[in-house]
Image: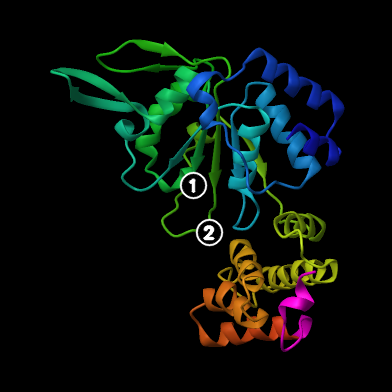
Amino acid sequence: MLDFLRSEGVSPRIIKELEAFRTKFPAEGALRRRIPEPRYLYYGKDIWEEAATALLCGENLLLVGPKATGKNVLAENLAAVFARPSWDVSFYINTDAATLLGTDTFAEGAVSLRKGPIYRCAEEGGFGILDEINMAKNESLAVLHATLDFRRSIDMPGYDRITLHDATRFIATMNYGYAGTRELNEALASRFVVIDMPAISTEGLVKLLTREFPGLRPAYADQFAGLFQDIQRKCDGGELSTKPLDLRGLLAAVRLMRAGLEGNRALELGLVNKSFDSFERQLVTDVIRTRLPDEIRFEDVFA
């Protein structure tokens, strides 16, 4: 991962600080299994420098942006580059203190604490990835206030108060556009530094496609990246909803092509059919037709 940061042009001083952090806080034993091994890499020098510097300074991160900006990819990449075990917390309307911190359980004839992911992060010096943090009720997130601010502690009723490990960090993601989201509590938001995630660039998308599909011909890598940018512009202009703007869908479509499915049928499954409005599906099909041929054969796309 550090070599990847060097290839992205990240400041050597920041990389040196990352190496010092990893030396100071080595993950040992069973915790090493929780260090992510990212399948996808985040491309973007400026965002990497901002995020890494914030975490090195002991801050917690809030990654804000619409879909397909790589929030979860960056969060996972950060845990990997810092070589820290990570715990993923998916928020939903019924998330409560017991879900986050832990709850009493009965084992071997005695009541004991079944530790939640926030407790484990605090104890083990992990990175807590708080996915779609604005999906949960604000009152349930209030239990995190002392954990995320200068106190850096968890006070469990009936149990000991624990102080967070020096390596513990929290990375939250949020998207205002999803159904069920709400405004984030100001008191909670103030405990993060916020990065407004930009849309993936054409250059970054080409790198992503080339890394994921080594046999992909450069001309088609450029065309698929351009297609995604065309859809992005249509969404920004209000001509399309964000449903067909699906990076996972594009990757899935290329994967289907590699498996032998005709290209336009693969794009229909990965992008076009993500919209359930027939008029919008036709618009997405038209965007594809303006950039790609009527038949996309395997031997044209892959070397």
- Number of disc labels: 2
Which image quadrant is residue 78 in?
top right
Numbered disc in front, either 1 or 2: 1
The magenta-colored residue range is 290-303
User: Between residues 121 and 231, which one lies in front from this camera angle?
Assistant: 121
Disc 1 secondary structure class = loop
What residue is drawn where x is 69% and y is 15%?
23
**Quadrant position of the N terminus in the picture:** top right
Q: Which of marks 1 and 2 is nearer the N terminus?
A: 1
Which image quadrant is residue 256 in?
bottom right
Q: Magenta stretch containing residue 297, yes or no?
A: yes
Which image quadrant is residue 200 in?
bottom right
For the residues labelled 1 and 2, say whether their Cβ atoms are less than 8 Å apart. Answer: no
The amino acid on which the numbered mark 1 sits, given as a three-letter code, is Glu
Disc 2 secondary structure class = loop
What residue is drawn where x is 65% and y is 84%?
285
The amino acid on which the numbered mark 2 sits, given as a three-letter code, is Gly
Q: What's the distance in space between the residues labelled 1 and 2, CA to CA?
A: 11 Å
Most distant residue in the top direction: 160
Give the residue number, with chain letter if any, for mark 1.
Answer: 132
> Where residue 253 appears, x then y in whole percent?
62, 70
**Quadrant position of the C terminus in the picture:** bottom right
> Where residue 247 appears, x then y in whole percent?
63, 62
> Where residue 75 appears, x then y in whole percent?
60, 40
Above-or-below relation of 40 to 294: above
Q: Magenta stretch containing residue 200, yes or no?
A: no
Give the residue number, with chain letter if any, for mark 2.
Answer: 177
What residue is drawn where x is 41% and y is 12%?
162
